[in-house]
Image (spheres, rainbow, N blue to C red):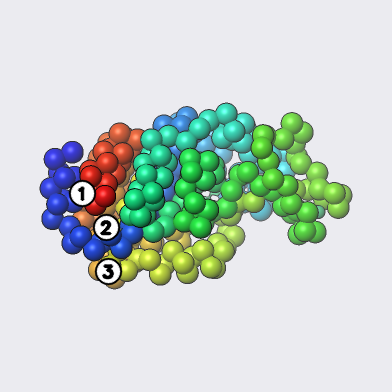
Amino acid sequence: MENIKKFVDELDRDLISNGMVFIIGAGASVASGLKTFRGEEGHYKDHRPEDLASAYGFMRDPDLVWEWYQMRMRKVFDAKPNAIHNALVDLEKHNLLDTIITQNVDGFHHRAGSSLDKIVEIHGTITKSHCFDNCGETIDYVAAPDEVPVKCKCGGLQRPSVVWFGETLNSDDLIRSQNRMMRDRLVVTIGTSGIVYPVAALPFIAKQNGATVIDFNLEASSISEIADLFVEGPAEKTFPEFAEYVISLYQ
Ligand code: BV8
Ligand code: ZN
């Protein structure tokens, strides 16, 4: 904690009062009981990402893919946001949060109380599905579907409203995120391995543009190597301490 306090004390105060930008990865939901993608316990342990999180994999085996999402939806709806999500809500309440760019599809930020207009679900959400053949039919879920694959009214199949590998991200989301990777910003990454593009490029763009980057992660990654401060440890412990200290200085 001392390293965090010293770093924050020496920061240009505008960086925080301008509103911080957060880039969130699967590690931020571990404390809620969700798995990461690439850890030893990770989702991708038994399958390649392309087999599960891709349109090709879905077309080849919609049952396998829907069973995977059904299992994840059950965990998401049974789980709840954790201290990281709650600390972000506090920072927003103190006008110290500009944007949450989350790669997570669990919807925890909104459930914790973050305002929708502050959240960019840049890889979509597991709480919705839409027609694989784009007939326009969509479904909002409050629980995991009992029957999978989920059939669509048009006779086709529904698919989870997430961004799969090989699919482009929503361009507005991407432009909005890239526009914040600027010198007048403090960019904070929490629990992401920095492997999946184009989101993985954001912290590097931030550094190139003169922004300040803090990385919260259990272990070093390509992001921690370029970060101005790397806070090693479980972010559900370290990040709330950071948020509390920042709020104590700026409230
Ligand atoms: C695209 C939604 C244009 C679905 C996901 C070769 C080189 C470069 C890029 C590519 C390439 N080949 C293909 C690509 C592009 C590809 C890509 O980046 N592949 C990677 C694997 C190399 N990207 C795409 O396809 C993207 N689209 O580029 O379109 C295009 C089109 C065609 C062809 C080429 C390009 C779309 C990417 C989006 C994919 N969808 N998810 C779903 O969730 O089911 S990605 C998936 O990974 C999740 O969204 C996840 O959030 C995301 C990133 O992973 P992380 O969040 O970082 O999670 P991870 O498990 O990796 O790491 C967890 C971290 O937490 C670890 O560092 C761990 O140490 C830490 N941690 C754990 N516990 C804690 C903790 N930290 C703190 N506290 C703890 N307690
Ligand atoms: Zn349909």
Cα distance in 3D space between marks 3 and 2: 12 Å
> Horizontally, is 119 left or right of 88 in the view?
right
| Label 1: few (<14), some (14–19) or many (≥20) C-alpha neighbours in 10 Å | few
- The image shows residue 34 at horizontal and vertical percentages of 49, 33
Q: Which residue is mark 2?
A: 16
In terms of secondary structure, where does tag 1 sit? helix
* Vertical comparison of 210 with 6: above or below: below
Q: Nearer the viewer, mark 2 or mark 1?
A: 1
Left or right side of 161 for 237: left
Q: Amino acid at mark 1?
A: Leu
Q: Amino acid at mark 2?
A: Ile
Q: Which residue is mark 3?
A: 183
| Label ID, residue 168 | none
- The answer to which of marks 1 and 3 sits earlier in the sequence is 3
Please identify the quadrant where the N terminus is shown: top left
User: Going by the picture, which residue comes out furthest to the front?
Assistant: 251
Residue 28 in percent (x, y) is at 41, 40
| Image: 46 above or below 12 | above
Nearest to the observer: residue 249 or residue 31: 249
